[in-house]
Image: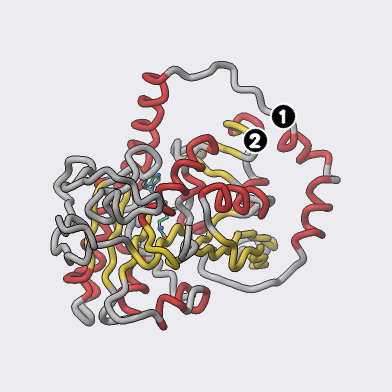
Amino acid sequence: MSSKDWEAENYYSKDFDWEQLREEVENNPSFQFHFLPFSPNQIADQDAEEEAHQEDSQAWDQFHARHSTGKFFKERRYLLKEFPELASCEKNSKVLEVGCGNGSTALPILRGREDIILYACDCSNEALERAKHIVSAANSISTIHRFHPFLCDFSTTGFPSLLSCNNCSRDFSQKRSSGFSGVNSSYEINDVNPVCPDETKCCIGGTDFVTLIFTLSALPLDRMPKAIKHCFDVLKPGGLLLFRDYGLYDMTMLRFGPDRRMGYREYLRPDRTRSFFFCLDTVRSLASAAGFTEMELEYCCVKSVNRRNGKIMKRVWVHGKFQKPTCT
Ligand SMILES: C[S@@+](CC[C@H](N)C(=O)[O-])C[C@H]1O[C@@H](n2cnc3c(N)ncnc32)[C@H](O)[C@@H]1O
């Protein structure tokens, strides 16, 4: 991923019609390889799968180590416009930012409301270092005291039970859990607010929001259903999943060559990080299979001009908002 890609995400509007782009792409012979069915040449056993998870996290660690300068950091200033609930929510609301990277999403949320409490996870320790540094440097309205970063691969382990114990999660499981079940790391959650209805007061009672901003696309498609379910389980009833990610036929998808395909609509960048490109139906089925109710789901289509060569770039993102039902 280049810093240009990252930068380009800082827009929101409807500059062109997605259906028209779909027609152009699907009728262009040079893009036909993107639509070929994909047959993986082997079915991975559990060890191979575990190794693949580690490779994915290592690729992100290296990515964050390479982009360690503040120059690469781009605060997502559009975030509160896209998701105004983050500004108008109740006092002391809790947000979980999943795959926080260097804090591009975390910082505007913390700045937006001076009482919001933000938990932020990433599978990369390097990313957490960067995020912590950037949030402390922001030095405004005591952001750092409300920022709780922790290491976690949400697609495998799920989230620590300290965020939402079994009693507080959707299925109201009979099991009682009393401890932090996250990955052992120098980043652990502290300052627990004991609002858990369980008499053990073992967790914070779930979060009001989960933000999933350009993170789900980093996972292989087969790990997405479980990952979204983990987001569902950590939310309080009525809580919101706020989603934004790469959309089908985004210019960065069309730049991949055939050798970069890892699956249907799945690609591997030269730095070995993954990228999936979502159509609305894929996001819709993932969210509804997890139990969410759809509130908003649409393509954001943005045209911008490459300053170096004057070429028009058509960017496509998916914007979504989903609610955990109050009664399940
Ligand atoms: C494109 S960045 C997005 C960062 C941030 N959400 C933002 O808005 O800028 C994707 C982030 O997801 C993290 N990530 C990738 N796979 C993950 C996983 N399985 N669990 C947790 N974090 C993951 C990467 O380390 C990276 O920091």
Task: In the rendered view, tell whether residue 119 sits above or below residue 177.
Answer: below
Image x and y of residue 299, in percent: 66, 63
The residue at the point 43 percent across, 54 percent down is 232
The residue tagged with tag 1: helix, strand or loop? loop
Q: Is the Cβ of the residue at disc 1 closer than 8 Å to that at disc 2?
A: yes
Image x and y of residue 22, in percent: 78, 53
Q: Quadrant of residue 129?
A: bottom left
Pick whichever of labels 1 and 2 is earlier in the sequence.
1
Q: Is residue 117 left or right of residue 227?
A: left
Q: Quadrant of residue 237?
A: bottom left
Q: Quadrant of residue 101?
A: bottom left
The residue at the point 37 percent across, 55 percent down is 98
Check residue 14 in the rendering and tell me which mark sits there, or answer none: none
Residue tagged 1: 37
Residue type at the position of mark 1: Pro
The residue tagged with tag 2: helix, strand or loop? loop
As measured in the structure, the alpha-carbon distance from the residue carrying label 1 to the one carrying label 2 is 7 Å
The residue at the point 64 percent across, 60 percent down is 315
Residue type at the position of mark 2: Tyr
Image x and y of residue 189, in percent: 18, 56
Residue tagged 2: 264
Say if residue 139 shows up in the picture. yes
Mark 1 packing: few (<14 Cα in 10 Å), some, or many (20+)?
Answer: few
Image x and y of residue 23, in percent: 83, 52
The residue at the point 22 percent across, 41 percent down is 183
Which color scheme is applied? secondary structure
Task: In the rendered view, tell whether residue 213 sits above or below residue 49.
Answer: below
